[in-house]
Image (cartoon, rainbow, N blue to C red):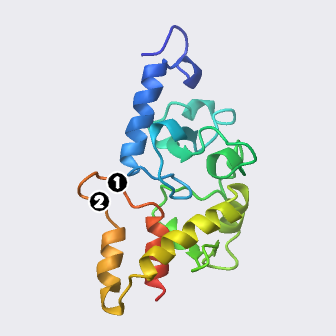
């Protein structure tokens, strides 16, 4: 439980934050809420979707908490996802990874790049820009994930492959990294 005083994020004990992070990672199938890269407890951080400095009343609301990659940046590593987002939030533009239509608002190309599905979708444009989702590092990681699937792809298995990448691995209950990207590309074939 929290220390004395009003409950807030900074007053949560280390063990409580650790358990919360583990719960979020498990719920997310061990992938980053924004880019889809594999995350583990030591290389991720708890992300306040609506930033706690602007929405202090939501800082302990589970529905406002997500797990994002990049706990600590390596030297010269570009910021992306929650680290790039920082305290940016616009209720009219920021696309929540929890929104049912989230995945349909983005399109991925075989080269790993991301763009809005609808060229006029300002929310998708701003989310891509503020989360730095179209940086070279992420494009290369997505490109490799897509290529691994397409190199072994057979036309008659599109539906089967889509079904596989839409679900968690039964053995470890984790999603495949970049699974939503792979499903998006498969659905365009």
Q: What residue sits 35% from the left and 76% below the top?
A: 162
At mark 1, the secondary structure is loop
Could you tell me residue 159's position as x and y percent?
A: 32, 83
In this image, 70 relative to 36: left or right?
right
Name the residue carrying label 1: 174
At mark 2, the secondary structure is loop
Q: What residue sits 40% from the left and 29% below the top?
A: 19
Figure quadrant of the N terminus: top left
Mark 1 vs 2: CB contact within 8 A: yes
Could you tell me residue 63's position as x and y percent?
A: 46, 42
Name the residue carrying label 2: 169
Position of 126 relative to 119 (above/below): above
Could you tell me residue 186's position as x and y percent?
A: 44, 81
Label 2: few (<14), some or many (≥20) within 10 Å? Answer: few
Label 1: few (<14), some or many (≥20) within 10 Å? Answer: some
Q: Nearer the viewer, residue 43 or 29?
A: 43
Q: Nearer the viewer, residue 60 or 135?
A: 135
Q: Which mark is residue 154?
A: none
Number of marks? 2
Mark positioned earlier in the residue sequence (1 or 2): 2
Position of 35 relative to 118 (above/below): above
């Amino acid at each position: 439980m929290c220390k004395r005083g009003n409950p807030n994020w900074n007053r949560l004990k280390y063990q409580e934050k650790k358990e919360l992070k583990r719960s979020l990672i498990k719920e997310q199938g061990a992938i980053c809420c924004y880019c889809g890269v594999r995350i583990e407890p030591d290389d991720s951080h708890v992300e306040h979707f609506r930033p706690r400095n602007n929405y202090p009343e939501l800082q302990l609301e589970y529905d406002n908490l997500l797990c994002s990659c990049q706990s600590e940046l390596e030297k010269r590593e570009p910021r992306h996802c929650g680290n790039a987002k920082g305290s940016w939030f616009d209720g009219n533009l920021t696309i929540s990874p929890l929104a049912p239509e989230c995945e349909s608002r983005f399109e991925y190309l075989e080269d790993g790049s991301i763009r809005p599905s609808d060229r006029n979708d300002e929310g998708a444009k701003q989310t891509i820009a503020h989360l730095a989702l179209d940086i070279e590092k992420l494009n290369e990681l997505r490109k490799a994930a897509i290529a691994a699937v397409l190199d072994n792809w057979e036309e008659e298995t599109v539906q089967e492959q889509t079904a596989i990448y839409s679900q968690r691995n039964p053995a470890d209950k984790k999603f495949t990294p970049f699974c939503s990207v792979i499903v998006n590309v498969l659905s365009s074939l």
